[in-house]
Amino acid sequence: MGNVFIGGSGASSWPGLVFSDQNLKENIVNITSSIDILSKLKVVSYNLKADMLPQLNVDVTKTYGLLAQNVEAVIPELVKDVVVPASYDSSGTITNPSITVKSLNYTGLIPFAIGGIQELNGKQKEMQATLSRDGLSDAQVKTNVITFNALAKIKTLQPVQYNFTNTNVPQLTFKSNTDYGFIAQQLGTVYPELVDTLRIEATYDSLGAVVNPSKLLKTVNYKAMSGLLVRSIQEQQSTIDSLKTVVSKQDSINNAVQQQLANLAALIDGCCHSNNRVNNDATQTTLNQMDIELSDKDAIVLDQNVPNPFAEQTTITYNVPASVGKAQIIFFNTNGQVIQTVDIKTRGKGKVNVFASDLSSGLYNYSLIADGKIIDSKKMVRE
């Protein structure tokens, strides 16, 4: 309705500008957590009440903005109480009394808006980097690449069936259908590198009061688990192939033993028939007889480990006579590398208890060496 004069906050010597020179400022502190602050503000549409401020002839059309009381609870420095002066008639009589109302420094909200955009931009870049890294598998961007064994650890995991609940984190919305997966806390005890922590931000009401507090929730990198599962399947297949080899060799041994037994039975049968013919011969030819006693106390024996295949422990029995000077049992992997050597100090029958909790699944060999000569070799399978 006339000239406007501005003093104090927002005043400047240049129309449309606000003093912002660094040399004019002190106690400069960076604003952090702008998103948290802005999330507590309630954006509304409204109409001003004309009868509350008749002396200002306010515009009563619908507009948009904030409520000073709401902003004051979050950023009190932007809200001030101002007095709208009374209005008088020509005789000096008060027609509209003065009234104290709350005013809002909308210009002061701009730094929070800029800070919020910057924070969101940073989070977007972080999320983009994470998404890109999860799907990126080129050898050029990887280092410390090594093969690994996974089956032993995978067997300790506990897949579960579950339903998500909104009870503890109401600000999240979950489907109520049944799902399948892992509990991050349990998975973290086996593969901590597959578990991360996600912060769920708090929610607020129109006055800035916390409705649902922030929560720290654990997440699982299910995509990385695909490599573990593939490796476990490969290890299981390797064990199956090793077992097939052992079974095939055992079948060959069994067939050979059966053939030897059949040959022995034929010889015994032929011998018996021959003796019957001799006994029935009228000439009664005199037969020379020999008595022998068999003993294996002087035989060098290496038995097959029992059980075979085995999980954590197996036992090997042997016999080393007193005539042997130095005896050893040597264990090899499939590449022929020595993984353990056991010196046999005592003579006679004995056994070796083999514990293999830290041994990878697969096929292994062991040999009995007596005075520098390989007496016998066996195969054993670690599940």
Image (spheres, rainbow, N blue to C red):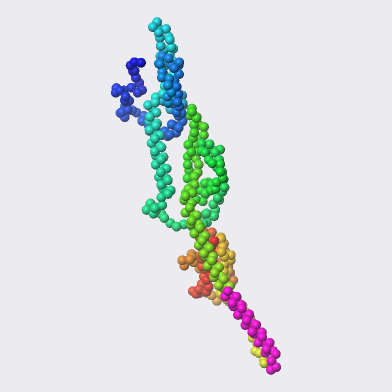
Asked if 184 appears above or below 27 in the picture, the reply is below
Can residue 206 be seen here?
Answer: yes
Magenta residue check for 275: yes
Quadrant (top left, top right, bottom left, bottom right) of the C terminus: bottom right
Does residue 343 lie above or below 220 as drawn?
below
Front position in the image: 106 or 157: 106
Residue 302 in the figure: left or right of residue 20: right
Name of the residue lying farthest toward the top: 91
State the extent of the magenta-drawn residues as a range: 255-284
Q: Quadrant of the N terminus?
A: top left
Left or right: residue 155 versus residue 72 is right
- Residue at coordinates 65% horizontally, 82% vertically from top-left? 269
Magenta span: chief secondary structure: helix
In the rendered picture of this protein, how many numbered marks are placed on residues?
0
Which residue is painted at 55% across and 76% down in the image?
Answer: 323
Measured from the top left, where is residue 222 in percent x and y?
A: 49, 49
When asked about the image quadrant of residue 116, the answer is top left
Give the percent coordinates (x, y) of residue 235. Answer: 50, 59
Rendered residue at 56%/62% (across/down)? 310
Give the answer, above or below, for where 115 lies relative to 160: above
Q: For residue 102, say whether it is visible.
A: no
19 and 43: which is toward the camera = 43
Of all residues, the one furthest to the left in this rendering is 14
Q: Residue furthest bottom?
A: 283
Q: Is residue 254 left or right of residue 145?
A: right
> Residue 330's spot in the image, x, y percent?
50, 68
For the point 53% across and 40% down, the residue is 174
Measured from the top left, where is residue 111 in percent x and y?
A: 38, 30
Left or right for 15, reference 185: left
Question: Is residue 52 shown in magenta?
Answer: no
